[in-house]
Image (cartoon, helix red, strand yellow):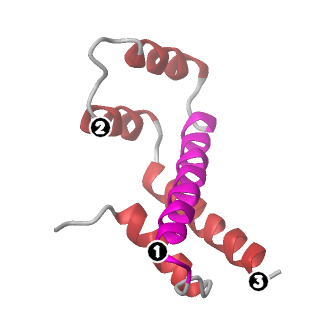
Amino acid sequence: MTQDPAILFLENLMTEAGLTNLPEDYKKEYLNKIQMELNQRIGMIIMENLDEKDAKEFSKLIDQKPLPGATQMQKFFADKIPGLEQKIKDGMVLFAQQFLSAVKK
């Protein structure tokens, strides 16, 4: 079974933070919460890097019925934001640093 790279990243982050001994139901809930936080951060990175014209185009795209698929959305962002993959990686590194710093307090 192929696992979502973001989930694998977050599970590894939880392990690095020493959060492996949590009860299973709490661990799942915690994982869901940090996944939502990571998704918000990635969304912010994307929106910060779209110019006004592309943001309007994105708005029209998500108003379509049915909604575009994930592949179409990824292509849209990759076409509009140079270096997007690296920007997301950098954002994930920063997220990990902040998470680990907060957990260790």
Q: Which residue is mark 3?
A: 104
Residue 30: image location, x then y, percent = 57, 64
Residue 73: image location, x then y, percent = 34, 33
Relative to 60, 65 lies left or right: left
**Amino acid type shown at disc 1:** Glu
Question: For the point 53% across and 60% down, which residue is it?
Answer: 29
> In the image as oriented, which residue stretches furthest toward the right?
105
Disc nearer the start of the sequence (1/3): 1
* SS at mark 3 in the image: loop
Residue 24: image location, x then y, percent = 46, 74
Q: If the image is split into quadrants, where does the C terminus sit? A: bottom right
Q: Nearer the viewer, residue 79 or 92?
A: 92
Circles 1 and 2: CB distance less than 8 Å? Answer: no
* SS at mark 2 in the image: helix
**Amino acid type shown at disc 2:** Ala
Determine crowd level at label 1: few under 14, some 14-19, many 20+ residues with C-alpha closer than 10 A.
Answer: few
Question: For the point 51% across and 64% down, which residue is it?
Answer: 31
Q: Which residue is mark 2?
A: 70
Residue at mark 3 to residue at mark 2: CA–CA distance: 35 Å
* The quarter of the displayed image where residue 64 is located: top left
Question: For the point 50% across and 22% down, which residue is it?
Answer: 54
Relative to 70, 45 lies left or right: right
User: Does 51 sit above or below residue 92?
Assistant: above
Residue at mark 1 to residue at mark 2: CA–CA distance: 30 Å
Q: Which residue range is magenta in the image? A: 22-48
Disc nearer the start of the sequence (3/2): 2
User: Does 20 sit above or below residue 34?
Assistant: below
